[in-house]
Image (cartoon, rainbow, N blue to C red):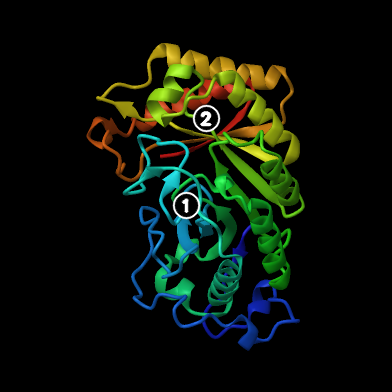
Amino acid sequence: MGLQAPCVGRDISDNGFQAAASLSVTDLAAPSHIVDTSNKPLTPTDHSRDAAGMTYVYPVVSRRAGGVSVGINLNPNNACNWRCIYCQVPGLTRGAAPEIDLALLERELSGFLHELLQGDFMVTRVPESARRINDIALSGNGEPTSAKAFVEVIELIGRVMARFDLTGKIKLVLITNGSLLDKAYVQAGLQQMRSLNGEVWFKLDSATREGLRRINHAELSPERVFVNLQTAAGLCTTWLQTCMFAIDGAAPPEAEQQAYLDFVRRIVSAGVPVQGVLLYGLARPSQQPEAPRLSALPAGWMEVFAEKIRACGLAVKVSL
């Protein structure tokens, strides 16, 4: 479910949703530094974290989510515990999220939601076909669960959603590599997300140790990935998120494809409550050293692979 933004001049209640009555317009108004006034239109290929001039909050016209995602970037230091070769973050470094300024995050999120729902941001910056709020998404320039204040961040988002009467009307999405799901604080955050219409997008680009090393620069075994996936799916609605692409003009080797499909079969046979697979390709250039070697796979190849996954028992959504 998404929340459609009103046209300028229309009352928000025309669309069946209202901002929280307990807050005045003055309470919710964004400080002048929060919303960018450049009027540069956003497109599905523009995922700039600076699009609204804030530290943590940014808008994305999401081809996978089908509307505007309100992104929350907990890694403004461009640090991640993985280094995926298709990553679009320039200057990516290995590391964790810095200390989060929770008060600033709450001001930015409240101010930007107010601008989306009662301001002119949708009309001036977003294509007409995408003028709805689809979700709030924890995704950015690194692994969001590496933030030590992860639980506090989820609680904060829940408070803001309640103020705007958004709880249950939009999703709260966590886009994660899943590598920290063995941590108690991450599990506690997912439990909180469950009550907020939460959804986890759990990265799985390869089901072999060598593939994880080559694609994600992650020293993680497929068995550990499976255990972490079980944990995530047991705590919150979970989808697999898989990026497929060509390296040096070649599609993933047959052995890699079969290992992935075997992993999916294991998910199904073990009864892990994964909703399905979000299968996507390259839409924007990588900012990593391997970029010249990467290219998008043909739509036909992606759909054939999607059918193989479906034959294993999971639903698939394809985005090219």
Q: Which amino acid does label 1 sit on?
A: Gly
Going by the numbered disc 2, the residue's amino acid type is Leu
Q: Which residue is drawn at 56% across and 75% down?
A: 111
Out of 289 and 169, give the one closest to the viewer.
289
Using a 10 Å C-alpha cutoff, classify the residue at mark 1 as few (fewer than 14 neighbours), some (14 to 19) or many (20 or more): many
Q: Residue 189 carries which label?
A: none
Closest to the camera, between mark 1 and mark 2, is: 1
Residue 230 placement (x, y as % from top left): 69, 28
Toward which corner of the image does residue 167 lie, by quadrant?
bottom right
Q: What element carries label 2?
A: loop
User: Which tag, 1 or 2, sits closer to the chain's start?
Assistant: 1
Q: Is residue 62 above or below residue 316?
A: below
Residue closest to the eye, 211 or 148: 148
Using the image, determine if residue 209 lies above or below residue 95: above
Tag of residue 204: 2
Name the foreground residue: 292 vs 129. 292
Q: Seen in the image, is 248 located left or right of residue 13?
A: left
> At 58% from the left edge and 76% from the top edge, which residue is drawn?
114
Image height check: is 299 above or below 71? Answer: above
User: What residue did someone put label 1 on?
Assistant: 140
